[in-house]
Image (tube, helix red, strand yellow):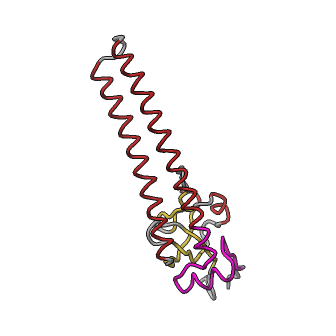
Amino acid sequence: MRRVSSQIIAASPNDLKNNRLGLMSREQVITLQAQVDHFQARLTQLTSRAVKLAIAITVAVVLLTFVRVLALPLALAIEVVVVGVMLYLSADFNRFVQQLALDREAEAVRIVKGRASRYTLRAHPLYNTLRIELQTYKLLDGGLAKQFITGELYQYYVLPQSGVVIAAESIGEKNSRYLL
């Protein structure tokens, strides 16, 4: 028989009680609202910086084209890439913030059971990723990723729209026996 100690990640007993019922606790809703507000402020800053950077690159490309350092097709390609990257980043960040806002309004939690793998974490400007079985979920706090033990069985509480893990608890393997 394997003995596993109880491990709770990013939750209080009241949070877990509500999460097991498929609901977010009041504290989790307040925390999520604060995160949404923070991300919306970052989105505004990101958009203004991206526009300023795009204007600066456009001015530089136009000047280099007039001085005949850059050929017109190359200048157009540079502008298409700059605008494409700016639109992609803005749309990606905006979509994530909207999903978090929808999750906050719904106050619902999905329960996922599985084993974590820390080795597939990738950095994103807004979140880290965590691989659970065959799915990839998001963590808003990068420090939480270090608390998961690779291969251990956990019950995760995930926001349905954004796929953010808000809490987890180890459920262990009760009465598991190994055949010799």
Q: Residue placed at 58% from the left, 70% from the top?
A: 166
> 116 or 19: which is nearer to us?
19
Q: Up-down: is 2 above or below 130?
A: below
Picture quarter with the N terminus: bottom right
The image shows residue 177 at horizontal and vertical percentages of: 62, 85
Left or right: where does residue 111 sit relative to residue 145? left
Q: Residue placed at 72% from the left, 79% from the top?
A: 5
Q: Up-down: is 92 above or below 68?
A: below
The quadrant in which residue 8 appears is bottom right
The image shows residue 55 at horizontal and vertical percentages of: 42, 30
> 37 or 157: which is nearer to us?
37
Q: Residue placed at 34% from the left, 16% from the top?
A: 65
Q: Residue placed at 52% from the left, 51% from the top?
A: 124
Q: Residue furthest top?
A: 67
Q: Residue furthest left?
A: 73
Span shown in magenta: 6-32
> 161 or 122: which is nearer to us?
161
Instruction: Find out whether residue 28 is within the magenta segment.
Output: yes
Picture quarter with the C terminus: bottom right
Q: Up-down: is 117 above or below 18?
A: above
Instruction: Find out whether residue 17 is within the magenta segment.
Output: yes
